[in-house]
Image (cartoon, rainbow, N blue to C red):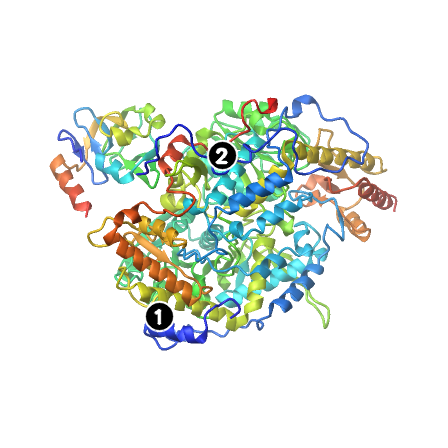
Amino acid sequence: MINAPEQTKVKIVEPTIFDLSSPGRTGVTMPASDVPETALPPEELLRPDLPLPELAEVDVVRHYMHLSSFNYSVDSGFYPLGSCTMKYNPKINEDTCRLPGFLYTHPLQPIETVQGNLALMYQLQEWLKEISGFAGVTLQPAAGAHGEFTGVLIMRAYHKSRGDHKRVKMLIPDSAHGTNPASSGMMGLQVVQIPSDSRGNVDLKALEAACDDTVVGMMLTNPNTLGLFDENIEKVIELVHNCGGLMYGDGANLNALLGIVRPGDLGFDVMHFNLHKTFSVPHGGGGPGSGPVGVAAHLVDFLPEPLVGIIEEGEDDMPPLYGFVKPAKTIGRMKAFHGHFGGGMVRAFTYIAMHGPDGLRDISQYAVLNANYLQARLRGTYKIPYDRICMHEFVAEGRFEGSDVRALDIAKRLMDYNFHPPTNYFPLIVHEALMIEPTETENKDTLDAFADALIKIAEEAKTNPEVVKSAPHTTKFGRMDEVKAARELVLCCWLPENYSDQ
Amino acid sequence: MTYIPISPRERDAMLETIGVKSLDDLFEDVPAKHRFPKLDLPPALTEMEVLDELSGLAQANENVHSDLISFLGAGAYNHYIPSVVDHMLRRGEFYTAYTPYQPEISQGTLQAIFEYQSLMCALTGMEVSNASHYDGATAAAEAVNLAFAQFRGKRRKVVVSPTVHPQYRAVIRTYTQGMDLELAGDDPNADLESSPENLQSLVSEDTCLVIVQYPDFFGRIYDYTKLIEAAHAKGALVCVVANPTALAMFKTPGAMGADIVVGDGQPLGIPLWYGGPSVGFFTTRKQYVHKMAGRLVGETMDSKGQRSYVLTLTAREQHIKRERATSNICTNQGLIALGTAVYLSLLGKKGLRQVAELCYQKAHYAAAQLSKIEGMGLCFSEPFFHEFALCLNRPVEEVNAHLLEHGILGGYNLGQDYPALKNHMLIAVTEMNTKEDIDALVEALSEVSHD
Amino acid sequence: MNIPTNLKYTKSDEWFDPATGAMGITDYAQSQLSDIVFVELLVEEGDTLEAGKPIASVESVKASAEIYAPAGGKVAAVNKGLADKPEAINSDPYGEAWMIQLEGAAEGDLMDSAAYEKYCAERTH
């Protein structure tokens, strides 16, 4: 438990934007009105006061600059967060997505005035189809979980369209991301958990027993959250298909598969992409993401509306006319407008265009190389519960015989060595899990330094466990009192009392 | 191999440590017949070439900054974005960080979200805000999830005003497909002239939520206090979908008694970007916080006695509650939420009110001038903010084609969603439209009217 | 670990008092969940329950759990004050933090305190 020093006054490192406010300041001056004045509506329709802060531009800039300095980021160091694919985000993406033609187009403009946007979206749909082996792609979903929800809606609509109403079960491995059962739960489906076998694959016996004519389908991450490619993937898919179920692929781990294998070729029916993992869209401190969904031919008619299509074929040197089309049995609309165009699609387009087929394969090969290298360096110091050639990530146990140091402590101690910790306590099937995904954009020196730090921490756990258990020591902020936060629930701040009298 | 920093020599040393001969040997678990497909994609471009290609695509668009004068709104608005906003969003410390799961090294993101939550509460007049949803439409759909969970599925009716944005209503229909809910009021053929109190008759003991929009899709301002009282009398919750710029001058939904306020934060310093990403804000009353989806930042103290911030009440969320979670949401719109916080901090109390009043003044000037044109007129007489429905004497497509020839992006064609509003156009005016722009619109529309 | 001998126990870590019909979650359960910050009772006075039906939902700073009825019967009382004081589940799981009281309870297959103690010990490794 956290023992904060006894004191009467909490120390403030950076005041909030409300604390910094002073009456009469402003950061922006708007032009005066150039039209004849109209009377405001009746008083009772207006708000008496707008309690927003008041700051000058320099105050605002310094405040956010201070805040930015409290963050660890990919730009500042190694960020091996498992299942999150924290790769380097190329700077050119930041320029392309801010080209004025993209930045200042309205989503409801006539299609003739936005052919550049539509051509880009069409091309991206085509590229994602080619990369994944699917027949259709929607770019609308805003994030991975949103894509999953889209996929589950499509699966349900498919069964319903065939008059098959008794399917209510979704099969989900015990190693799955929490979004998989949550997406199914949102549809009122019953989640059936399928265990993993001793090699980290789906347990085929348990799967076979669960497969019957009430199965909507299975949601599978492959490579799974242990970083392992399922050795029986074709058999798994066959079992699900044989009972009439559909196979959903969670594309969170697609960074291992570019140019290696296409999920559509393996027999997956639906899959979401995470453009913010695989295709270098930055994570933005928690979003925005972008979660396009690909489907096999028999599901194309169910995709959300609208898709980008060719309205009139081009001729010779005339490009085609792109526009929106509505799939015949569409599940409907997933969000307003067309998805995360600027933040997601333009960046991903730039990234794919700069890699080409060989470059994409390099990405996955080096992502897998880096993960296996780290695994090899740490084997012997940390227990690897499912120890075989991994894909883009692997899971180690953050505990040692005869020591009460936990994965959480190791994670915090890594901060003292200037590394972002791996994902911990996930997947749930590994005790004290440390889930490590280095990505392809790290060099050998960084990987070695990280492995050295982890090996050093393992030593410390034996020789000086207190230093690990009370880490981090070198960061600006120490461990947080999470119980206080949840019990007191201070969720916002305001202008100080008697603010206007200042 | 543009971004891979490993030399062939290093690669070989690493392969040796692993104990395999080649990169290809790492993929033996992948079924051989599908391994290493040849992808039919164009060859790699250099940075110089890709910038050229993307610039070409961007220039193939007509944008509302330098090519067109825009009077198009309908849920996405062309406002001025102070320079500072993008400078902050371009800080790698913000945009290349992940979700702040390690609070010791994520206080920048955490405090920024806490401030965003605070700003949204101040703007909507509510008590708590989450860290954001994908957009206004999905935030409205999540309001249904909250209300449905609040009554534990015992109330199965949602009343949706037909004057909620058509795409928002469409998203609510998509989201609720598996919930066995009745959506009442979601009827484009309903009487659109009538006041919101008419929705009251649809609210029953079985209603979990009533959803209205403020200003409504036609730009009209209503005080929903009476409707909210009536809904509460039946035990239902009320969600108001609000335009955040309007909230700088008009009575807050919080003051009307709303239980949930959602909306799209794009007008607060976020570029149009062809519709996304934007940010969906979601505020509610403290009593519903445990049923609210999405991430939430709370204040606490660290081991050094410093005020600090953490993600809190995380056991509500999908990674812990799995299939029992209210929603599957994981990613929020962190960076875009940061953008709105920077915008609101810069404009502040006076600046935002000024923007709202400029919109109001210019829209009213435009409405007054346009309604003088023979054969045209305002559809509705209620007070409005910065959007209004204009009745034309010919099809909207035809009028908009004419406007486009004059470099004007005309309004939204209401007939595509509301059969009764054939030949009606929804016009949006913001502080970006000068009197000269408005006069040009009036002149171009006078021409069509007399053709 | 506090395991009162006068109570009966379920495999999902609820306790049941055959004398009063009261029930709640055990000391073991609260220690596994850690600091509890939210509790929602899912049943009302007068409801008729079957054993195994969810009666409450509990969230701590790091976990969430459904709480199930240890026995069938009619809900005679619910602890309405608990929602405002979820931390009582940590401090007094067998007393102040009772959840509901059943009337005419049909006991299911419950463990006595010795069996439950053994069951808890098995799981701590």
Which amino acid, by three-letter code, is at mark 1? Asp
Tell me which corner region of the image, top left, top right, bottom left or bottom right, holds residue B150. Answer: top left
Tell me which corner region of the image, top left, top right, bottom left or bottom right, holds residue A497. Answer: top right
Query: Residue visible at 37% across and 37% down?
Result: A481
Q: Is residue A267 visible?
A: no
The chain containing the residue under callout 1 comes to B
Task: Give the residue number, with chain letter if any, for mark 2.
Answer: B157
Q: Secondary structure at mark 2?
A: strand
Q: Position of residue A476 (x, y in %)?
A: 43, 44
Q: Position of residue B255 (x, y in %)?
A: 57, 25
Q: Secondary structure at mark 1?
A: loop
Q: Position of residue A363 (x, y in %)?
A: 47, 67
Q: Nearer the viewer, residue A158 or A318?
A: A318
Q: Residues within 10 Å of mark 1 (few under 14, many from 20)?
A: some
Which amino acid, by three-letter code, is at mark 2? Lys
The chain containing the residue under callout 2 comes to B
Q: If you read the primary sequence from the N terminus, does the residue marked by circle 2 or circle 1 appear first? A: 1
Q: Position of residue A430 (x, y in %)?
A: 29, 54
Q: Disc 2 versus disc 1: distance between alpha carbons? A: 50 Å
Task: Give the residue number, with chain letter if any, for mark 1.
Answer: B29
Side of B422 where C26 appears, left or right: left
